Image (cartoon, rainbow, N blue to C red):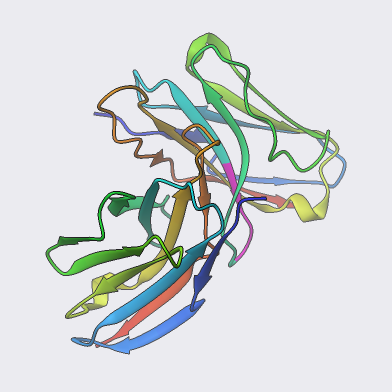
Amino acid sequence: GAGVSQSPSNKVTEKGKDVELRCDPISGHTALYWYRQSLGQGLEFLIYFQGNSAPDKSGLPSDRFSAERTGGSVSTLTIQRTQQEDSAVYLCASSVLGTGATGELFFGEGSRLTVL
Amino acid sequence: GENVEQHPSTLSVQEGDSAVIKCTYSDSASNYFPWYKQELGKGPQLIIDIRSNVGEKKDQRIAVTLNKTAKHFSLHITETQPEDSAVYFCAARFNNAGNMLTFGGGTRLMVKP
């Protein structure tokens, strides 16, 4: 079956512009995560959606970052007034939760954002 | 806050040798410790995991060990092959974090043929 799909795969933008990154999780996965991976660095948690619960936004680095998940499926990460330090690969993952689930995160291939 | 430290950041071995990557975590109540492999241009993929009620787990050439007392866990790859070259991430699920994982900084493993 299809894995986690992210778009665009590459985005180059000018400083100050807004960008939207999209994530299509695996069908039936109730949890969705956004992580950021700067060049040569680890995975920095940004935000976590679980079912209909309020999202865990504790990892968002500033109020320029926001995310939503519509209908419990597709998610959009929005970065307003982009800065050069926002340049990174933004990874989305989804997982199944609940009794018997392993909790494995399935990652997409990421959206590489370059802010000039 | 919760923290996962990973060492080394880079590791170069000869084909056929073993590779060991180590991680420490901060929350003693953590209960789940996966390892992910990230190949160039791809997203990370789970390769093995261990839960807090188990001390060691093996899957062919890879194994993971967990020392709860010392709060550290390690990935062991034996008989390394060039296709093992990738970035490896350890992670921990902290007790109060739902299903969210905190990742280590990653180890770039290079296996020389």
The x, y position of residue A37, in whole percent, is 59, 54
The x, y position of residue B6, in whole percent, is 50, 69
The x, y position of residue A57, in whole percent, is 68, 31
Q: Is residue B105 left or right of residue B90?
A: right
Residue lying at 25% horizontally and 53% vertically, measured from the top left: B54
Q: Is residue A76 left or right of residue A33?
A: right
Image quarter where the C terminus of chain A lies is bottom right
Q: Which residues are magenta?
A: A35-39
Residue A110 vs B82, above or below: the answer is above
The x, y position of residue B47, in whole percent, is 28, 55
Q: Nearer the viewer, residue B65 or B9?
A: B65
Whether residue A116 is visible to the viewer of this picture, yes or no, is no
Residue A77 vs A36, above or below: the answer is above
Residue lying at 81% horizontally and 42% vertically, measured from the top left: A82
The answer to whether residue A37 is magenta is: yes
Q: Is residue A14 left or right of residue A36?
A: right
Residue lying at 40% horizontally and 65% vertically, measured from the top left: B88
| Magenta part, dominant SS | strand
Spot the residue most to the front: B69
Image quarter where the N terminus of chain A lies is top left
Spot the residue most to the left: B60
